[in-house]
Image (spheres, rainbow, N blue to C red):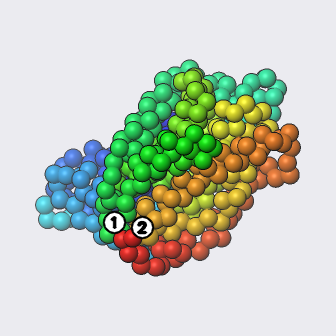
Amino acid sequence: MDSLRELFKIGNGPSSSHTMGPERSAKKFKVDNPDACSYRVELYGSLAATGKGHLTDWIIIETLKPKKTEILWKSEVSYEYHANGMKFFALDSDGNILKEWLVFSVGGGTIMEDGQARQGGSDVYPLGKMTEIMEWCSKNRKELWEYVEEMEGSSIWPFLEKIWEAMESCIKTGINKTGVLPGTLKYPRKAQSFYRKARRDNSRNGFIGKIFAYTLAVSEENGGGGRVVTAPTCGASGVIPGLLYALKEEYNLSEDEVLKGLAIAGLIGNIIKENATISGAEGGCQAEVGAACSMAAGMSTFLLGGSLKQIEYSAEIALEHHLGLTCDPVGGYVQIPCIERNAAAAVRALDAANYSLYTDGQHAVSFDQVVLTMKETGRDLKCEYKETSLGGLAKFNFDAEC
């Protein structure tokens, strides 16, 4: 499995697949072709279907400036390797092709070329299944965060510190904004009003309200193209920071505990990425918000004192109960149902953690089994339910009353 540095990335929303991946691709192609007079970029499959609402064309054009770039939308073209394909063309002054490059945005901002190994391409983590990692931890009397440190080295902690700083910054920025998000939906920001209600409520409802508020703050920033952390994607970026920020406040968590929790969340996300997918275009929203909920559940269980088995159980619960979740962004924007879905998943992650803590950690379906099932379910989903805006809620027209 790859390093957590390839899972948690800081960048601008609204989509790691549709914004961050294309941006990284455009930067590379620009460096490799400095003598081009202009560029042409063809967008394929899901990348073309929802690219407008996800700002794909905008980010590519901005990245390739000052030279002119023509964007061609070809949603009818799809490659077996991945639904998010794009081809860059470097052109001379007469419009002749100097060089072309086919590349894929495979989820979480990661870009790959056709035929490149999607799994097992890195030896940072020699063990790629939760069962194997749990056996290692039991044998060596270590916790999951210690396995991360063992594989990544001590340099992982300064990296996770920067990730947490970015998450906190996003919450603080988002919680102080009002108005509507960009786009035709005119979706209103709600994080600030949620927070005002929650902070005067000292009951359990107030705590839940803060989870909602902090998660909304991040998801609204993402929906507006703000700076977020892929956790594991931009579309699911609100779940982990929203819940973790609320837990830190509620239980006065130390910075050390927060970073250990992030390490465990990252490890869980890495296992999902390695053995299934974190791409909405490939697996539906179960691969994005479902994965984020699973990561957050395991993280929360650790922070609330859970055992190794309870951590695994809560991660399994959270992902299991997102199986089949569709990715149907209305209008191609990462707003409806994405923003609200992040808030709901953050609380569901805490519920999964609390449920597992009431058990001894023994259960029938393993985390590895549900990850494999998620992968198979993603394959079975019709393309209309995988980030194409052709099915589900995306079929309906909504007015601005949100």
Q: Residue furthest top?
A: 154
Query: Horizontally, is 361 left or right of 312 in the view?
Result: right
Disc 2 residue type? Cys
Please provide percent x and percent y for residue 333: 40, 64
Taking the spot 18% from the left edge, 65% from the top edge, the residue there is 95
Residue 289, image quadrant: bottom right
Q: Is residue 233 above or below residue 102?
A: above
Give the mark nearest the N terminus, 1 or 2: 1
Residue furthest to the bottom: 396
Query: Mark 1 packing: few (<14 Cα in 10 Å), some, or many (20+)?
Result: some
Residue labelled with disc 2: 402
| Residue 105 placement: quadrant | bottom left
**Pointers 1 and 2 in contact (C-beta within 8 Å):** yes
Give the number of marks: 2
Q: CA distance from mark 1 to mark 2?
A: 8 Å
Along the viewing direction, whichever of 117 and 1 lies nearer the viewer? 1
Q: Secondary structure at mark 2?
A: loop
Looking at the image, residue 72 sits to the left or right of residue 312; the answer is left
> In the rendered image, which quarter contains the N terminus?
top right
- x, y (%) of residue 119? 61, 48
| Image height of 186 relative to 253, above or below | below
Can you give x and y, in whole percent of width and height, for residue 152 in the image?
58, 27
* Residue that label 1 marks: 186
